[in-house]
Amino acid sequence: MTSLSIQPTDGPVGAFVSGIDLADAPDPATAAALRTALGKHGVLFFRDQTLTPEAHIAFAQTLAPIVINRFFTPVDGYPNIAEVRKEADQKTNIGGAWHADHSYDQIPAMGSILVAKELPPEGGDTLFAGMYAAHDSLPADIRDRIAGLRALHSSRHVFGADADHRKDPDVDTGDRYHNARAATQDVWHPMVIRHPLSGRKSLYVNPDFTVQIDGLPQAESDALLALLFEHAKRPEHIYRFEWEPGSIALWDNRATWHMALNDYHGHRRLMHRITLAGVGLEG
């Protein structure tokens, strides 16, 4: 661990990690340092890595147990690695709207590890928004208003049989999603959580999966959520990560949102993602 270097980005979220070769699973002390850094910075970026699926799995297991995604097509022969893929002839990508992975689970995922496998010649960057900064920069009256409130997160409208994308003829998911009948998750979480690693307050709602605020009429709930969503995705909360061959991003779903840019039409982009188990959330 003596050579490990963690340097914050020039934005409001994220840090670059160097001095480590993830082809060999980190020792316990290094893994603990990475978890601490993840809680502090929200997302960690690694360059010039070469990870086989086996090494990807081994790295993930030093951080937390692996959660198998119900809805993404898995990598052939590796059911605990999900494919995040867009073919050259497809119009839509996976993750092209702001979201936090697995917020619809009773115990939401801690994080995700995304490994670049095939990249377009240009484009395909990922935006990350910091939810510590989003919370702390809210007007005081809004912070007071949402403190102690809960919001409903659901998988149904994104992955279910009646999902929004299935009604749009321009959306071609191909074989990238499956298991629609398993999209039955509905769970209430605090709108502001105390982050389990850092202890900081983090805004915990997201545009893809958060659908209702407890105790408010739907119209009032929709208006308040829209206000929060627009605030959180302001430029001052966002860092843009440019993928290169050998890049890896490890993000914390309790402290960040992310969105994959869909600006590389006519080219293939393939990533491998492992999801890491979390703990119950408290406000």
Image (cartoon, rainbow, N blue to C red):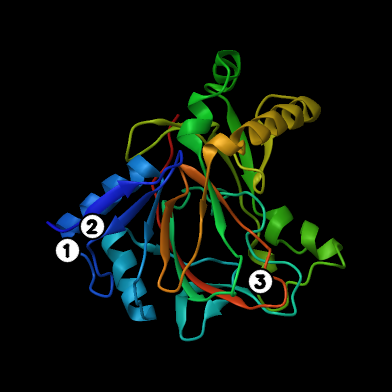
User: Callout 1: few (<14), some (14-19), or many (20+) C-alpha neighbours within 10 Å?
Assistant: few
Query: Would residue 229 be seen by someone viewing this image from the given angle?
Result: yes
Residue at 45% over, 38% down: 12
Residue sticking out furthest to the bottom: 77
Q: Identify the amino acid type marked 1.
A: Asp
Q: Identify the amino acid type marked 2.
A: Ala
Residue at 69% over, 61% down: 159
Secondary structure found at label 2 = helix
**What is the CA distance from the residue labelled 3 to the residue labelled 2?**
32 Å
Q: Identify the amino acid type marked 3.
A: Tyr
Residue at 85% over, 67% down: 170
Identify the residue under disc 3: 177
- Residue 31's tag is 2
Tag 1–tag 2 contact (CB < 8 Å): yes
| Image vertical order of residue 207 relative to residue 217, above or below | below
The quarter holding residue 175 reads: bottom right
The quarter holding residue 194 reads: top left
Identify the residue under disc 1: 27
- 63 or 156: nearer the viewer: 63
The quarter of the rendered structure image containing the N terminus is bottom left
Tag 3–tag 2 contact (CB < 8 Å): no
The quarter of the rendered structure image containing the C terminus is top left
Secondary structure found at label 1 = loop
